[in-house]
Image: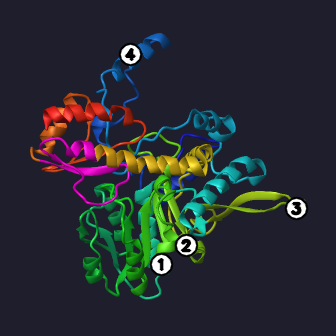
Amino acid sequence: MGGHNTGSPYAPHTPEETAAMLDAVGADREADLFDIPESVRFDGEFNIPARDERTVRREVRELLDRNDQLVEFLGRGHYDHYVPSAVDHLADRQEFLTSYTQYQPEIAQGFLQALFEYQSMLVELTGLDIANCSLYDAATALGETATLAARVRESSGSHVLVPEHLQAGKRGVLENYASGVDLTVDTYPMDDGAADIGALEDAMAEDVVLVYAESPTVRGVVEESLAEIGALADGHDALFCLGSDPVALSILKEPAAVGADVVIGDAATLGLPAAYGMGLGMFATRESFLRQVPGRLVGASEDASGRRAYTLTLQTREQHIRRERATSNICTNQAWVALRAAIHAAWLGPGGLVDLASDCVSRAETLAAELDEIAGIQAPVHDRHHFREFVASTDQPAAAIAADLREEGFAVHAVDDHLLQVCVTETTANATDDLVDTLEVVA
């Protein structure tokens, strides 16, 4: 609140203004507004002895060297693709790094154009009309879709249907969103790793506002029944949301063609290495939902001299003057991350993106076949097409096998008592032979 600042441009409250605000909320001092345990309160001392730069660098290096050096065949929502050096070199220019939200279009035309191109790429990949450039990650994009569905559905409804294999963290974020608007999240069964259409049809009711499906699923399965899911949703006046990512969308059927109303996912499969938490929420939808889209949209127009110009066309949070009309409290600025995704996509080009996606199919297929030759392992479990990753069944306990692999320098997911999940991309393709050899010993 800046009670001790008088004239700071960042916290301009005078002692009198601070006292008035504290009186309005019934607090005696600013510290009363926070409940911080004594054990973690800052006592004014950092207790960090002064060191020269060389010493600090050596200590940090020694600390990082204590990390396990594992080859990570991990997926389930976080994917490691090679990021070209051009992405770093271009995105690290100071005009990008120092820019926050591009409120002033007259000085941010380059950045706004880059975001417009990012939106255009998502529109082309999804076949939908509108794309967003400012959401946290795939989980929050799904939550925002649920609240959008509750707003735009003409009749009342309170249920959201998601696949039973939905990743737990994504499910948790969705339920947090749903609880705020009195929605209930229910699951529909899976059949051999894909949607059980018969069970989904039985679960459909007039109070369903949103049906969510993924392709590829969290287990890497390419969903074959998207058109049927879209038809079921449409027949019950519910929205159909598809979860995917830009790499997969380059070779999968266009979401708009299977009836998707919203496409969400993590666009950070382009432009970012696997950061285990850092993402970029992809969100595309139909133009009829334009005024309901969370976050920000960049639009193209003309300036006074008739030249093409870019500006923030829509900020539906209305954070500046009409907060009571906000459709979302999403206020992050993901522009720099979206910029990186756009640079990566442009560097690959349409052909390169398709080649990358095709390799994600063939590498998973090849590795699954090699693991299937190992005694005690059956792969893939699901008789489906896979993208990047697949599930393998193990005769021995999966957790024990995963632990043995870790000792040998490999990380895989143990997703059940006798199920391992393995993900392969171009960053780990050169280590698949070693993984197979090691599994032959430990399985």
Q: In the rendered image, which residue does mark 2 sit on?
A: 292
Give the distance between the C-alpha atoms of the residues marked 4 and 1, in whole angstroms. 53 Å
Measured along the vertical axis of the image, is residue 400 above or below residue 148?
Answer: above
Label ID, residue 426: none
**Residue type highlighted by circle 1:** Arg
Give the distance between the C-alpha atoms of the residues marked 4 and 3, in whole angstroms. 58 Å
Question: Dots 1 and 3: beta carbons under 8 Å?
Answer: no
Q: Residue at x 38, y 36 (%)?
A: 429
Mark nearest the camera among 2 and 3 is 3
Q: In the rendered image, which residue does mark 1 sit on?
A: 151
Give the distance between the C-alpha atoms of the residues marked 2 and 3, in whole angstroms. 30 Å
Question: Dots 4 and 2: beta carbons under 8 Å?
Answer: no
Label ID, residue 306: 3
Give residue 311's quadrant in the image.
Answer: bottom right
Question: Dots 1 and 2: beta carbons under 8 Å?
Answer: yes
| Magenta segment | 369-394
**Residue type highlighted by circle 3:** Gly
